[in-house]
């Protein structure tokens, strides 16, 4: 297999909840929690949560495109968010928890646009899809305690994911 790796960057609300679904996918090499989309260099969690930096909580997925397609990563993304919510995700509110797809090249942009159009036309939602598709910006790794949070603190993570409403939403819309 050719030694090629690619990056995919997604904002899906709380990054803790976005890491696990991607890590479980064969062909995904690494998933980092971090911040992107804003103007502040090297932001901290506290700065991003203040909604003053323009950044969102995001994940950057490193993957082998020969093993897992970008289309598959898009499907995982859509099935782990509420793409109709413009104000955040579930109990997490504010611009730092908004959703977005950050494309790294024209192919990713086209595939993301196609996937959003398909979701609008054939998806389970009766409200407009508001997740933007924008160029990738500098990605800043989140602090170490945020990396792999679901593995480091599984009990708290499960309580958080369930209590936030994300689990129930996913089961309602994507139970297949």
Image (cartoon, rainbow, N blue to C red):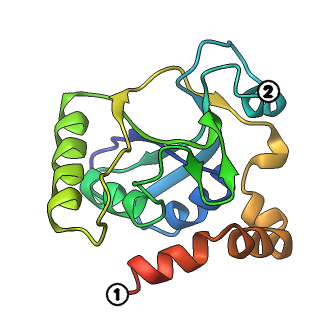
Q: Position of residue 98 (x, y in %)?
A: 54, 42
Quadrant occupied by the C terminus: bottom left
Left or right relative to 59: residue 159: right
The location of residue 63, given as percent across then percent down, is 41, 49
Residue drawn at (44%, 67%), measured in percent from left and top?
A: 25
Tag of residue 44: 2
Dividing the picture into quadrants, the one containing residue 75 is bottom left
In terms of image quadrants, where is residue 43?
top right
Question: At 50% across and 53% down in the image, what residue appears?
Answer: 29
- Numbered badge on residue 176: 1
The secondary element bearing badge 1 is classed as: loop
**What separation in Å lies between label 1 and label 2 (alpha carbons)?**
38 Å
Pointer 1 local density, CA inside 10 Å: few below 14, some 14–19, many at least 20: few
Q: Is residue 16 left or right of residue 105?
A: right
Q: Nearer the viewer, residue 30 or 145?
A: 145
Left or right: 142 in relation to 8: right
Mark 2: few/some/many CA within 10 Å (<14, 14-19, 20+): some
Residue 146 position (above or below residue 82): above
């Amino acid at each position: 297999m050719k030694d090629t790796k690619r990056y995919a960057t997604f904002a899906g609300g709380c990054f803790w909840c976005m890491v696990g679904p991607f890590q479980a996918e064969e062909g995904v090499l690494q998933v980092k929690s971090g911040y992107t989309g804003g103007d502040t260099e090297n932001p901290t969690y506290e700065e991003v949560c203040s909604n003053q930096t323009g950044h969102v909580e995001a994940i950057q997925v490193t993957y082998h495109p020969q093993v897992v397609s970008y289309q598959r990563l898009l499907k995982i993304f859509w099935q782990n968010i509420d793409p109709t919510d413009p104000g955040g995700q579930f109990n997490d509110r504010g611009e730092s928890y908004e959703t977005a797809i950050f494309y790294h090249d024209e192919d990713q942009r086209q595939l993301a646009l196609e996937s959003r159009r398909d979701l609008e036309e054939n998806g389970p939602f009766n409200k407009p899809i508001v997740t933007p598709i924008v160029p990738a910006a500098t990605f800043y790794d989140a602090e170490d305690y945020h990396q792999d949070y679901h593995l480091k603190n599984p009990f708290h993570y499960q309580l958080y994911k369930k209590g936030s409403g994300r689990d129930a939403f996913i089961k309602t819309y994507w139970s297949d």
